[in-house]
Image (cartoon, rainbow, N blue to C red):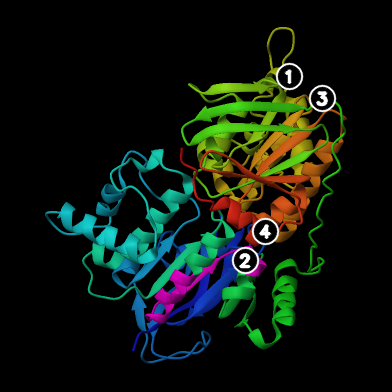
Amino acid sequence: MTKAIVARGMTKICDDGHPAIAGVDASFEPGELSVVCGENGAGKSTLLRAITGLIARDAGAVALADRPRTPATSSATEAPVAPGAEAALAAGLCMVQQHLALVPIFSAVENAVLFARGGLVDHAAIEALLKATLDRLGFVVPLDVPVGKLSVAERQRIEIARAVAAPALAGTKVPLRLLALDEPTAVLTPAEADGLYAVLRGIAEGGTAVVVVTHKLDEVRKFADHVLVLRRGKKVHDAPFVRADQDAAIDQVARAMLGDAHAHLAHTHRSSEQGRGGAPAVVAEGLALGALRRGTFAIQRGEVLGIAGVEGNGQGELVSILAGVARGWTGRVTPGPEAVTAIFPDRHAEGLVLDATVEDNLLLGSHRDFSGPLGLLDGDALAAEALRRARKAGAPTTLEALASSFSGGNQQKIVVARALGKSAPTVLVAAHPTRGVDVAAAAAIHQELLRWVAATPDRCALVISADLDELRTLSNRIVVLAHGEITGEFTPDATDAELGAAMLSVEKHG
């Protein structure tokens, strides 16, 4: 019998003395797909990282147990798991983190080799194992290309495959008992997310406890067997998801996540008639770079243009061109990058300096606006502006703290606060603006983004997202980018099926 994973009293104290998690009990059963929910900073990732040994815990214990989920009771059949990532992996516990732990200059196979243990490493055997795992998961990614050159989605697929194969790669004889994934669908289309969950369901049915961190209540509704909710580092809900009354079950989860806040945040589709008329604010003709082959579109003043598409079809190249950081591209676009403020798709690689303070990250690119006649910076003015930006977007206001000390969702709020805090630009380019952000914070970011566009008559925005509901919420029009070009234009009321058909359209030949 495959054993349950039981955690008791899990506690992790932050550098500032506050607990990220405090005395959390949890258990995850073989054969089940559990979901962990909560607002940003609630302790979700910290809990799973502590269970899988990726961070040291300050208190608590992890054990394997032949018994049902009753984490508060003891059992004579428990086998303790020693602290540390190697001990956890030896016990069959593995996690795919939100910010992928791959070496950019290594290929997929070379990254898989890092999990190997022992003397001589059989690269051919590891490549065969990784390829077989990718095939089993239905993932198609190149194995011999440095992963830093791949899209975020491709890198995530490699990490998931490496985690599934981790025990075999490490040479252990134990099965994969726990597979934890932190926001695994953040860069996937709805169809891809459904496919991933189908794979995860198969892994669970094979006897593994699968645990997913997600902010998407639709995923809870469709896929969860059990739901654990954390709020402010403590467990506030731990129960099976009752499919017989899904609406009531989702309401219970949402209320547990948000506390006294309103549990349901309705999506409102924007009208497709909200452009302000006159000459377009943005005109792009034949933009080409990498996967982007023919980027042609226009955005009206006052309009939000949404771009849907499977990751890797030119979205990243489009953002880089519009933001003025790309080289070697062809085509024409007006206005130039001096009119653009951007939210880049990878907050760690492109959006933040993790070892810099919150204040410095909030003001990147704006310091020259606060210098005196001799070039000296006005520290008080800088701090006041940083605080203004943080408060407006709900970002952390502890300005002297390092950006690396915050959860992924709070880091994203810093990136968004900086982009929306700039007053001079007239074009906002936002790639996945609420990736990794909880329900309430996402709604607040949406409101601030729309306020930014509405603040002056000449502003507009281009929003790229894998979340179709987000595009419907924000956009006046939605266009689909597939095979490096626009393959369809839709109103915000378009169905998933209509958008999906354009996203997965067969490439034209000839």
**Residue drawn at point x = 86 percent, y = 43 percent:** 273
Residue 464, x across and y down, in percent:
64, 44
Left or right: 386 as drawn, with respect to 510: right
For marks 3 and 1, the one nearer the N-term is 3
Residue 226, x across and y down, in percent:
57, 80
**From mark 2 to mark 4, how far is it between C-alphas?**
15 Å
- Residue type of the residue flagged with mark 3: Ala
Secondary structure at badge 3 equals loop
Dot 3: within a 10 Å radius of its alpha carbon, few (fewer than 14), some, or many (20 or more) residues? few
Circle 4 residue: 438
Residue 315 counted in the magenta span: no
Dot 2: within a 10 Å radius of its alpha carbon, few (fewer than 14), some, or many (20 or more) residues? many
**From mark 4 to mark 3, how far is it between C-alphas?**
37 Å
**From mark 4 to mark 1, how far is it between C-alphas?**
33 Å
**Residue drawn at point x = 50 percent, y = 76 percent:** 33
Circle 3 residue: 279
308, 211: nearer the viewer: 308
Left or right: 437 as drawn, with respect to 62: right
User: Which label sits in the foreground, 2 or 3?
Assistant: 3
Circle 1 residue: 369
| Numbered range of the magenta stretch | 198-218
For marks 4 and 1, the one nearer the N-term is 1
